[in-house]
Amino acid sequence: MAIDMELEEVLRPHQYEMIPYPPKVITLANGKQMVVRQAVREDVPAILKSVHPCLFIERDYYDIVSARLYGELLAWYRHRVKSEYCLIGQIDGYLVGIVNGRMETEKVGMSYHTLAIDRGLRIGSHLFAAKMEYHLEYLGQEEVLIVAESPIGFRRWMIEYPLEPTKIPHELGGGDSWLLTREIYFAAKPRLVVGERPVPQDLWEVATSDILFADDDTIRERIAGLKGR
Amino acid sequence: MRDVAIIGVGMIPFGRRDEDTLMDMLAYASLKALDDAGLGDKSVDAVYVGNMGSGAIQHQTAIASTLVDRLSLLPAAADTVENGPASGGSAVKNGLLAVASGYYDTVLVVGGEKMREVTGWRATDFVATMTHPTAEYPYGITLPGMAGMFTRLYMEKYGVTREHLVAVALKNQEMGTRNPYAHVEMALSKDGIYDNPAAVVNNPVVADPLHLYDACPVSDGAAALILCPLEKLKNPAKPPVVIAGFGQATDTQTLQERDDPTDLKAVTLAAGQAFEMAKLKPSDIHVAELHDAFTILEIAESEHVGFFKKGEGGKAVLAGKTRLGGQIPINLSGGLKARGHPVGATGVAQVVDIVWQLRNELPKDRQVKNAQNGLTVNFGGFGNNVLSFVLRRVQQ
């Protein structure tokens, strides 16, 4: 695709400087270790391959979450969104979850989506927590605006933290935003934010050598429930 | 009273079955049992359906009438049996008595529940409707809440530890990985749910001291069996299994009215009646399916039925005495913890699993060698209505 760089300067949004998210490793309920790390823009085409099969899964609103995530990641890849980031979870190199968001201002974060590709291991909870950790502890923001598109998300974010309801519209255009403040985050941190740093070298090498993907049928089966049920 | 044989069993995989209606599930399990019994086009005299929540969840009642029509079993007698989470066990009991009395010769018993049609909150509330309508429910009690309080007392009185509870969860979820009918086919690691700092998220407190993996999942599922008089069984294709004993007992609806809330009297009584009728004792049992809706219940029931002394059940799990190959293997199906707990199905599914054991039909990694006698405990309410069955393989 031909790109007119002169026009691109107009079309591309301003980007804030974003300190990198320091990777961590989390031991899951089944004993497997999930490396949580920041994806780079060049990873997007590969990540989209895992998002694509989820577009057609109605269960638990995977279709809308995946469709929007797909668009958001593509917007990042095409330089059409301001200050977006994406964190991924990998087990043995395989992509098992994706979260993304962006900086709305230097002080306010905008949470986008959480997609767990492997289910039943609280991968979504861990990755959402990593996302909030990034906003509040590393990007130094004061608060994050959040909405949920599924009842599971509502239970995990709004209830478990618990978030503060507001009348502030959210960029996704649905219900009003719920707010994660620094006070709420640090109160919830001991029971919701875990992980060890640094990531052991062997795990890091496997995670960064390549992003591996399960095939479409396997992804659909995993999302349809534990072992396809 | 005639001896009653189980001549056919069937089950469908438990889990989240979005594509099936409750009636689909009941029909599938029934057809499997009918097929297993080799009944072909022969009809049955009566059908008993164990179900707790079709009225509340599916807004559908009189499901036994619908099922006989769906299965073309008209004009068989048909009854729906509702007894909370012991509905399945009660359906088995009704079928047993109907055949034992001599009134019916061929009876289909099926238990099923479709709970994943509603959110987890609604399902928890639905199950809580079995609590006392004025003394408990209005104050927000749920079954996990009740189990949490029971666990705390049991820990204080008998020295049960979290490590004991974790051992039950690890054992049963490991067995779930070997059971194609199990809802949860995921093995856990002790590190991931107990030792590691990440366990605080992986295995959060649900109702202190119980954590997420101390509780069974909310499941859809169905199981069925066919009963007939042993005396009418000629040249059976499969080793016949008889219901050698059964018992049922009740207790106060509220826990606080019991002299000792840790004493599950109805379990002791029901199992005692079943042993007495079967002329067996706990040490004669080779395999058991106990109602582990919460890990503590497997430990407490194993003591109350007489497998272990009070205070020894948790240690026994930790020592591997309840594993395959142990002193008394318990919940080799994965139990409610891993097979799942579609409430109306559970009591029937427990019997089906024991029949498979006594017929020696399971793969090696789940089969107890030369199992002759098995026990089930189906625990209704919080121990206020309990059924127990002793099954025996008939020597041919």
Image (spheres, rainbow, N blue to C red):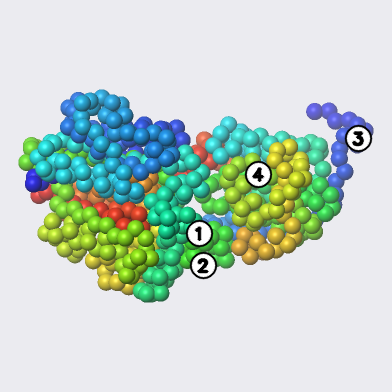
Q: Residue at x 44, y 47 (%)?
A: B126
Residue to which mark 1 is pinned: B206
Q: Residue under circle 4?
A: A148
In this rendering, the label closer to the viewer, 3 or 1: 1
Q: Position of residue B218 (x, y in %)?
A: 44, 47
- CB-based contact (under 8 Å), mark 4 and mark 3: no
Are discs 2 and 1 located on one and the same chain?
Answer: yes
Name the residue: 67% across, 47% down. A99
| Mark identifier at residue A10 | 3
Q: Position of residue B342 (x, y in %)?
A: 38, 45
**Cα–Cα span, label 3 and label 1:** 52 Å
- The kind of residue on which mark 4 rests is Ala
Structural crowding at the residue carrying mark 1, measured as other residues with C-alpha within 10 Å and reported as few (<14), some (14–19) or many (≥20): some
Residue B98 found in image quarter? top left
Front residue of A22 and B268:
B268
Tell me if residue A12 can be seen. Answer: yes
**Tag 1 or tag 2, which sits nearer the N-term?**
2
**Position of residue B361 measured from the top left corner of the image (x, y, whole percent):** 24, 45
What mark, if any, has residue B195 been given in the picture?
Answer: 2
Disc 3 residue type (three-letter)? Val
Label 2: few (<14), some or many (≥20) within 10 Å? few
